[in-house]
Amino acid sequence: MKNILFKYLFLQIFLFNVESSKILVFSPTISRSHMISNARIADTLASDGHNVTLLEVEFLAKVGELNASNVANTILVPGQFIDPKEFNTSMIAEMSFKKVDLPMDFIIGSIFQQTFNNACEKFLLVSEKLFDKLRNEKFDIIISEQLNFCGAGVGHLLNIPTNILVSSCPIQEHIASILGLSNPASYIPSLFDSNLPDKMSIYERTTNLFRQFAGYVYLIYGVDPLTKIFKKHYGAAFPDLRTIVAESPFVFVNVDEFLDFPRPIFSNIIYIGGLGMEEGKNTKINKIEDPINIEMSKGKKGVIFFSTGSVMRTTDMDENFRRNVLLTFSQLTDYHFIVKIENDDNFSLNFAKQFKNIFVTSWAPQTFILKHPRLKLFITHGGYNSLMESARAGIPLISMGFFADQYRNGRVAERNGWGLPFDKRLLLDGNEEFKESILQVIGDPSSFLG
């Protein structure tokens, strides 16, 4: 249904004749989930007859490793424009287990923005031939993300007349500011590492207000310096990136409006969460002897799935945390646990070997597992794609966020009565609270239903 509405809207907006549009989707490889989301947008439009090119630029993840697009034309730009040392996920993991104050969050955010801007500049410096080729394509529309406005700037360089902004998460503070959109701190939790509900005390509202201010780090250290980079290389007449984005006729928000907190929006803000997540797609494993199929048949009362996503590596997490997670699972013997870890996480692998009800794996078909009738609970890092997949599968969750909007996403599940947020730092010293949370969700759902 979401695909049909998206296509219909696009048709009504841009196409008053039978000709298709030429569309460029700019996809920096910030993470696997971003690559998948951008490819879904490209494929949905391409399958409707538009001439769509997915431009995948290697920021962090390797270009092409997912073969994310099945329908759109794809151009891969390798280079790893971000040095892994500049974007250290182990530092993110370490910081997420500490009580970090807002000024430190701001500093870390500014470092990441500078890193993304440097990557964009490196890409610009080696892409003149590519840009000449793309200009000759005479694209009508460019679609690009909000975390870094490199795509919006590239669209102007390529003389593409229409820029459409995609928000990969709920609308961030810097986007609301650029669009002139009201963003009340009294009931809209910040996306800047905020772990607040929408019903707040006076103290929480004050805290949220300061977190919203901190969210403007994207403007101060992200958008404005990137504008200067474009001006440095392409002349002082190059427009402000704020202006390019503000003139976007539409903002596509890769969020389901029913899986977010209520907020004011404009009529040109379109929610597209769930796009490309067709019912039944990627939910079958053909070989009956596949290890995942076998594991899903175990457990007297069912299966529980644990995954921290593609960015946070289990090897970067405190050993006490990993030990207490697995120890908790071992004590719930009526359930079988599928635990996704990294290939080189020897600690978790060896520790889990002593427990018959724990299966550890470096690869897990998440969609298949979430839609399996024997799954009872999803324990997640709280990434929005995981939140949405869990909701669509009707599976309750426990969310233990690590950074950015992940804490907030756990609060969304809590507000809507199908999940609980959990402070993972409690697992550094023991496992009783974690065990109680699991038993609460799977044993007495009415205790947390909204």
Image: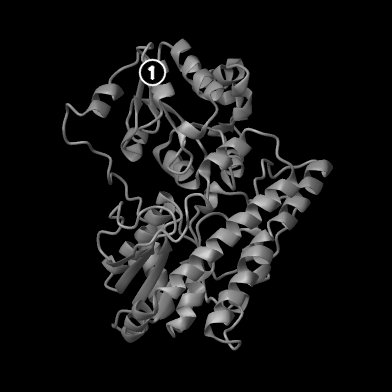
Up-down relation of residue 204 to residue 262 (above or below): above
Question: Residue 278, position in %: x, y?
Answer: 32, 50
Count of all numbered marks drawn on residues in the image:
1
Up-down relation of residue 440 to residue 288 (above or below): above
Residue 298 sits in which quadrant?
top left
Question: Residue 150, position in %: x, y?
Answer: 50, 70
On the question of residue 171 being in view, the answer is no
On the question of residue 339 being in view, the answer is yes
Q: Quadrant of the C terminus?
A: top right
Amino acid type, mark 1:
Asn
Residue position marked by numbered label 1 in the rendering: 350
Q: Which residue is drawn at 34% across and 15% down?
A: 299
Q: Residue at x 35, y 38 (%)?
A: 366
Q: Which residue is drawn at 38% across and 11% down?
A: 354
Toward the bottom, the furthest residue is: 237
Decide which of 378, 327 is in the foreground and name it: 327
Up-down relation of residue 73 to residue 95 (above or below): below
Left or right: 135 as drawn, with respect to 73: right
- Could you classify mark 1 by the number of other residues whose Cα lies within 10 Å: few (under 14), some (14-19), or many (20 or more)? few
Decide which of 298, 238 is in the foreground and name it: 238
Decide which of 357, 50 is in the foreground and name it: 357
Question: Residue 70, position in %: x, y?
Answer: 25, 59
Q: Quadrant of the N terminus?
A: bottom left
Coloring scheme used: one colour
Left or right: 76 as drawn, with respect to 265: left
Question: Residue 361, position in %: x, y?
Answer: 33, 29
Q: Residue at x 77, y 52 (%)?
A: 209
Residue 41 sits in which quadrant?
bottom left
Q: Is mark 1 on a helix, strand or loop?
A: helix
